[in-house]
Amino acid sequence: MRILTIARNTYRENIRDKILYNLILFGLLMTLSSVALGQLTLGHEDKVIVDLGLASMSVFGTLIAVFIGISLVYKELEKRTVYALLSKPVHRREFILGKYLGLLFTLLINVMIMTAGLWLTLLFHRGVGFDSYLRLLPAVYLIYLSLALTTALALVFSTFSTPALSALFTLFLWIIGHFNTDLLEFGKLTNSTPIRWVTTALYYALPNISNFTSLDSRSVIPHAGYYQPIDSRALGWISVYALLYAGVLLVIAITIFSRRDFK
Amino acid sequence: MSVIEIEDLTKDFRVGFWRKRPVRALDQLSLSVERGEVFGFVGPNGAGKTTTLKLLMHLLHPTSGSARILGEPVDSVSVRSRIGYLPENPYFYDHLTAEEFLSYLGSLFGIRQPALRRKVSALLERVGLAESHNLQLRKFSKGMVQRIGVAQAIINDPEVVFLDEPMSGLDPLGRREVRDVIVSLKARGVTVFFSSHILPDVEVLCDRVAILNKGTLREVGALHEILKVRIEGHEIILVGPVLEMSDSLRPMCDELRLMGDRLHLRVQTSSQVEKILSYAVAHGAELLSVNPIRASLEDYFFSEVTHQSRLLVSD
């Protein structure tokens, strides 16, 4: 119950923060701009709308996850609001989990708004079948999972670092996470065993963000020759991966936070 | 049973670039507080008062030693449902209104609606913030923040309340209101442990006082026990033809002041009192009062602190 209480308050604090609205607005504008850009593609406007819409959801969602995530704990420490909170019957782990869930819920609302914006944009295009709207949902789901993972990353850094460094580390790892598979391939190409070990270790240690961007317009719009069906089994494994990875990050965040002195 | 038991509590902070150099903020503090007491915790800046309170709230981990509140170790979460805490210079959530803030913290104790709503209204009334219930906390003045801080510290009807500089930033009216809250808590049998720089308030409110300096406990006990040895003389106030008498009385006393139609004399010994009274009455003056000059807590505090500083300098 206390976790939900903290989550509810975190959500309330987040939706009263202006940065959230600015980022959502930019995301929606980018989706709308795909209508104009689609005119340049000669018959593939629907693909451009879907790809740009999903990309803006991913990018702006990540920015929200990072900018709000890095200040989740830091702001409470800096402003010392954590003193009044932790003097109540609240475990430190409940505090971390409540903050995390609160931002997850904020991100869920954000993703729903951006999905609604994408649907409306597709509606104006009119050439898209009803089932494409449904096929968008797995892609949106994967993006949401990536945001949940990014939020957990930001939360870990927030427990011990300043907002600037936390943002830097989180975005750095998010970008590296897109090239995880390339890192592994690079290790395989070298003849050096130590390098292969290091790249393999990094492959498993770093978040594999490319997992969550595997669905795009090829899975949503069934044009002949382009259609890539959605593999439900793969979706299941990616979900397990996200759950486990975020779980490990939360354990790290709780451990660091539990040992902190609040000077 | 003592409600607060502190035993050899020590806290070192690690400073320096590699955080290797320890700085001792609290050195083997031991004291206990009984149920229903108002216990004052005084000391200059850097004495270790806030460190002690944070250790009791488990916001800091002790280097060594232990502390218990209501018989439970301070890291127990369950004991926090029976205590309240006001941090020093509190700052609360910018975007929440006063009502939302108290409801949020109240719900962490498991208080449900509609009881929570009633409790929040009553609390806001009690601390004089009923009209600001819908105002966001970022628009609160410092005094208002302090008052909402007191409210959140007592929302769960605690058995023990810890207040770190509760009068900080308050005007005389605000200080009076907080004093009244402390008095009412005492009347209900709540134990109050508070630190303050405003020594006259400590003197008025506290049953016992602990004086801390540079992380070490200097003195602890009932105020009248700490101050009883320090009767520093007597003050005599005379009225009547005092102007004519003042020259004659001046050699008999240590200090003489004419204030309007009253003559204030300060003497050290009882024999001086007798001599002055005999002369004054014989010459037609009227005795208004004879009062012992007892050192205030402030005087005692300053003499303790400067004495310790001198000892350190001579070392």
Image: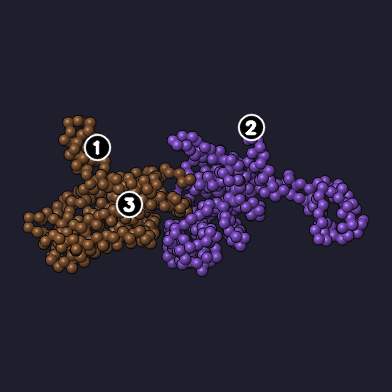
Chain colours: A brown, B purple
The answer to whether residue A57 is left or right of residue B293 is left
Task: State the residue at coordinates (24%, 45%).
Answer: A177
On residue A201, the disc is 1
Q: Determine if marks 3 and 2 fall on one subunit.
A: no
Q: Quadrant of the N terminus of chain A?
A: bottom left
Q: Dot 1: few (<14), some (14–19), or many (≥20) neighbours within 10 Å?
A: few
The residue that disc 2 covers is B315
Secondary element at image label 3 = helix
Q: In whole angstroms, how far apart are the C-alphas of marks 2 and 1?
A: 58 Å
Q: Nearer the viewer, residue B82 or B47?
A: B47
Query: In the rendering, at what x and y percent does residue B167 appear?
Result: 58, 56
Image depth: mark 2 or mark 1 in front: 2
Q: Is residue B290 visible?
A: no
Q: Are marks 1 and 3 in contact (CB under 8 Å)?
A: no
Cβ atoms under marks 2 and 1 closer than 8 Å:
no
Q: Which residue is mark 3?
A: A66
Crowd class of label 3 (few under 14; some 14 to 19; many from 20; radius 10 Å): many
Pointer 2 chain: B
* Percent position of residue A226, x then y: 10, 55
Chain identity of mark 3: A
Looking at the image, is B158 positioned above or below residue B125?
Answer: above
* Chain on which label 1 sits: A
Is residue B72 rendered to the left or right of residue B255? left
Query: Does dot 2 land on a helix, a strand or a loop?
Result: loop
Element class at badge 1: helix
**Quadrant in the picture for residue A22:** bottom left
Residue drawn at (66%, 41%) of the image: B306
Residue at (15, 68) in percent of width and height: A126
Amino acid type indicated by mark 1: Ala
The residues tagged by marks 3 and 2 sit, at their Cα atoms, a distance apart of 54 Å
Please tell me which residue lies in front, B24 or A58: A58
